[in-house]
Amino acid sequence: MKTPGRSHGLRNITATASPRTLMDESGAKSDPVWRARVMTLFPEMFPGPLGVSLTGKALEKHLWTLETLDIRSFARDKHRSVDDTPAGGGPGMVLRPEIVAQAIDASLKGVSDDRNLWPVICLSARGRPLTQERVARLAKGEGLSLLCGRFEGIDQRVLEARNVEEISVGDAVYTGGEIPAMALLDAVVRLLPGVLGKIESTEDESFSAGLLEHPQYTKPPVWEGRAIPEILLSGHHAKVDAWRYAQAQAVTKERRPDLWRAFHNVELDPAEEAEQSDPKHESQTRPK
């Protein structure tokens, strides 16, 4: 017997036999709320940290919804097995394509056929790196289906057949896709309308302008002999903005040379880039 999916919204968790229909008969979207459907072998892990703080409050206010589909519920044998040994040999087990395909198809019930509006994403260490630009595009869509892998991986054929996009949240291997899925959802949900109090809160963050964020300070003015930079206490907003911009460039150049190179390609014409690469220029412009 198929285990019902779980729908997380408001404070009560209600069971559904299958994901609810999100489009009416005409094909129009029936509910403007951004939705996430997560396919996992461990539905009890959700909402987890997504159920507290800003994302949790947004869930309670129905600014977004979260549904889980238990991958094991699509197994048909008495042992409810979902995996098998790797073709060609080797350690571990691989999730079977027919099981995963049924889960993906169920997660797409009643949603747009446009994968730009509703993508199917698998959290994978071999996926393309998650970027703030991709997060912003996801937040502008209608929702998404997230596939959380386990064991040695997922049969490649189902990923190709169902046009699954593989995304990585970092150069590290996790025991499963659930924690990376939570990280992706947290990044997306905070960009949804009404979740954060001020839009400015997202505009000055790391990656929003192609740079890492500048350092932050608060009271007391001096702590353990370390003082807040005087410029931040000057009340001169233009100078504060210039200082923060310089600091953002400095920390990006030091910690993320890949972002620094991309930022220069956007910001500078060839003459300016040559000037920036001059050691004399660098020594003169390095933030104090």
Image (spheres, helix red, strand yellow):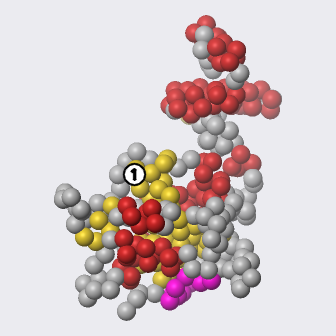
Vertical order, 166 against 236 (above or below): below
Say if the magenta span includes residue 181.
no
What secondary structure is the stretch in magenta mostly built from? loop
In the structure shown, which secondary structural element does the residue marked by tag 1 occupy?
strand
Name the residue at the top extreme.
280
Tell me the quarter of the image containing the C terminus: top right
Task: Answer whether residue 157 is visible to the viewer in this image.
Answer: yes
**On the picture, is 181 further left or further right than 235?**
left
Tally the numbered discs.
1
Residue 49 image point, x, y percent: 49, 65
In terms of image quadrants, where is residue 152? bottom left
Vertical order, 34 against 212 (above or below): below
Vertical order, 177 against 219 (above or below): below
Name the residue: 75% across, 31% down.
241
**On the picture, is 15 further left or further right than 210?**
left
Name the residue: 34% across, 82% down.
75
Residue 248 image point, x, y percent: 63, 31
**On the picture, is 142 further left or further right than 101?**
right
In terms of image quadrants, where is residue 45? bottom left
Name the residue: 63% across, 31% down.
263
Nearer to me, 124 or 205: 124
Vertical order, 279 against 182 (above or below): above
Residue 187 image point, x, y percent: 58, 56
In terms of image quadrants, where is residue 269? top right
Name the residue: 55% across, 75% down.
108
Residue 57 image point, x, y percent: 63, 69
Residue at the disc numbered 1: 125
Nearer to me, 245 or 92: 92
Q: What stretch is highlighted in magenta?
A: 12-21
Say if the magenta span includes residue 14.
yes
Callout 1, which amino acid? Ala
Nearer to me, 266 or 194: 266
